[in-house]
Image (tube, coloured by chain):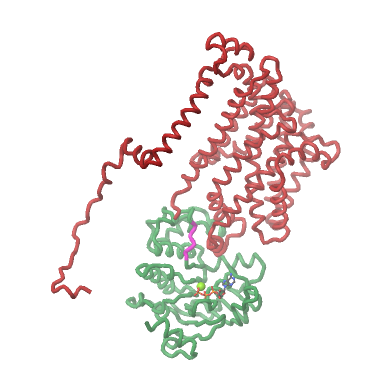
Amino acid sequence: MSDTHAQTVSFVRETMLPEAEPPVGNRGAILWMRENLFSGWFNILMTLVSLYVIWWALAHTMPWVFNGIWNAGSLTECREIRNATLGEGASAACWAVLGDRWQQLMFGFYPRELYWRPVLAFVIFLVAIAPVLFAGMPRRALWITALSPFVMFWLLWGGTAWFPVSIALGFVLGWAALRALAPIAGPLVAVIVAAALPIIYWFYTAGPLARELEQVVALRIEYVPSQDFGGFMLSFIIGIAGIILSLPLGILLALGRQSDLFIINKISVGFIEVIRGVPLIVWLFTASLLLNYFLPPGTNFDLMLRVIIMVTLFAAAYIAEVVRGGLAALPKGQYEAADALGLDYWKAMRLIILPQALKISIPGIVNTFIGLFKDTTLVVFIGLFDPIGLSNAIRASVEWNGIYWELFVFIGLLFFICCFSMSRYSLYLEKKLQRGHN
Amino acid sequence: MTDTTAARTIDRSHMQVSDEVAIEISNMNKWYGSFHVLRDIDLTVYQGERIVICGPSGSGKSTLIRCINRLEEHQSGRIVVDGTELSSDLKNIDKIRSEVGMCFQHFNLFPHLTILENCTLAPIWVRKTPKREAEEIAMHFLKKVKIPEQANKYPGQLSGGQQQRVAIARSLCMKPRIMLFDEPTSALDPEMIKEVLDTMIELAEEGMTMLCVTHEMGFARQVANRVIFMDQGQIVEQNEPEAFFMAPKSDRTKLFLSQILGH
Ligand SMILES: Nc1ncnc2c1ncn2[C@@H]1O[C@H](COP(=O)(O)OP(=O)(O)OP(=O)(O)O)[C@@H](O)[C@H]1O
Ligand SMILES: [Mg+2]
């Protein structure tokens, strides 16, 4: 190559160059603005138009928000105060309605003197999900998480404490059956028995058992029927129960849809397609009207419970499809490596496949959860008092007849806070799990 | 092909072939749909043998060794591994898989687990080894493949050669009696091939039964006690490496060798 040169001096670098700083002048607010907002005539035009639109929107809403009147007993009083202070026809919100009715928006018709119970349940909920959401908490804290649903149930509905205890006993029963049977009868039989036994127990034994125990040791607090539940408390209960229950169900459905076992595969596909292919509102009407026909006569299945089941099934179908996408995105080599090491199906899924597939699916799963949470407002159509339903109820009163925006802004804001937190959490989780992957 | 291992003299003292059968394949056939991939395969592998399988692309080499741990299912004939016949019985399959280690062309490490966790996973969950002990075993084998210092990194942070050595260590942690390799070096840059081959040579020196699909003919010459040539789903020729390379009998083998050796 280099023989054209008479003498080639070989070059050997003896000391390596130090790392250099990036050039200056790539920083500064002015520079940033010039690059991002005013880089060309089209960009300048877009910036100006956008600024105008933002200004226009703020100019029309901000006076309404900040001139708002906080102390008044009714809409008429609000108007009088406004006319006196700001002048006839000025734009001013009447936030007083929130001060007057926030309890209703939050708790529906839950007895006032018992508000501490849902509040305490909410605090327990926050404590219980912390170890699930954030790694680094002691593993033992998960026991609190496992017990919390029963405590929360008791706090919310009240009645005898023996009822949630005897429900919890069903889970213990199933777990014991699984433990006892798995070595003797094989995993399939064990799983079937472990699923069937608690269901039979809940239907026939749990109720009487709780009553018997109550006779022996009375442990009851005031019972609050589901009809009194409402407001954000209702949205929260349905939304959170739906989210927590639909994730495992959705994962099972996704695995079922991938399964080679004909029956399981077809049942999963059928379930997903039917549930997903019909609007949620139809399922909610089914829950409120039809479901009682299918249940054994005499069972009075709580409407809220039925709604939770429907919302769960609906979300699970979506989760299943999202997770299936994650499963399909994994290279085949991961399944093969797990197989080649001798891991059985469930271990391979739990330790190798699902951790990776779920990581890929996080944005889709959280998207589904956010959708589910907002869809809880649909229960207004079957007569449950979610925040929207309560806004109608508040408007029906003489004092607040005709008030719309203030209530909707408040409801919207609360929903936004919840959904935005979920979205932020999902980003945090994605970042945290990003380590080490190629 | 590159003769990357030529420089090393190897210790053959442990490389005794016993007369105990490790794998027995008789009259085995496999189809993908209507495509006949493997035809009447008969192969007996003795404990301690190092077998290299070569052949043109698509000849069924991967399929053959993947049948041995049932990553692929065969449709007729018998495969007996360590005295256990491969059937659709899941118990037998899991038993055989825990006895037979496998290394893949693309390593297939678990990217969400650290190197150490990759190595301890199967011992803990399949063999029920206590965690502490599993970690000791893992560190032992990571030292053996010369990357103990990487134990707490994730696979994505390692080079290809290092990843493949981790994959070998991961298999070894299960204390397998047989190791299968499917083109372990063909996804690697030339300078990393040697480090992986050296690891495999060491394994051979310790008397591991190995079946290895590879085009590294230097490795075959040095380590193998038998070279198998496959074409169109059949075993065309098998012989000791010297005889195989110097005096191939079939025309197809000659053609293949001339293509692969004679640049
Ligand atoms: N899952 C599959 N479905 C259908 N055909 C397949 C499948 N896997 C492999 N084949 C075909 O079977 C034949 C043998 O494949 P195999 O992977 O065993 O070849 P190979 O000898 O390992 O080739 P290479 O050297 O390219 O890896 C090829 O013709 C391939 O196209
Ligand atoms: Mg191959």
Q: Tell which of A217 and A50 is nearer to you.
A: A50
- Chain coloured green: which letter? B
Q: Is residue B6 left or right of residue A113?
A: left
Q: Does A273 sit left or right of A432 as displayed?
A: right
Confirm whether residue A184 shows in the render: no
Residue A264 occupies quadrant: bottom right
- What segment is highlighted magenta in the picture? B106-110
SS majority, magenta = loop
Task: Give the quadrant of the C terminus of chain B.
Answer: bottom left
Tell me where residue B228 appears, x and y as whole percent: 50, 82
Verify whether residue A287 appears in magenta: no
- B177 vs A256: above or below: below
Q: Which residue occupies 59% across, 25% down?
A: A410
- Residue A162 against residue A259 in the figure, above or below: above
Q: Nearer the viewer, residue A21 or A236?
A: A21
Is any part of residue A214 visible from this angle? Answer: yes
Where is residue A404? Give x, y as percent. 63, 23
Judge whether B2 appears above or below A144 on screen: below
Expressed as whole percent of the image width and height from the top left, the position of residue B199 reads 40, 69
- The residue positioned farthest toward the right in the image shown: A297
Residue at image position (51%, 86%) is B237
User: In the rendered image, what is the letter of the chain coloured red?
Assistant: A
Image quadrant where one finds the N terminus of chain B:
bottom left
Q: Return the x and y of residue A211 as percentages of the image width and height.
A: 79, 31
Viewer-proximal residue among A40 and B192: A40
Q: Left or right of A199: which side holds A386?
A: left
Relative vertical location of residue A79 with respect to residue B89 in this rendering, above or below: above
Q: Quadrant of residue B14?
A: bottom left
Residue visible at 64% across and 36% down in the picture? A239
Question: Which residue sits furthest top?
Answer: A84
Task: Answer left or right for A400 relative to A87.
Answer: right
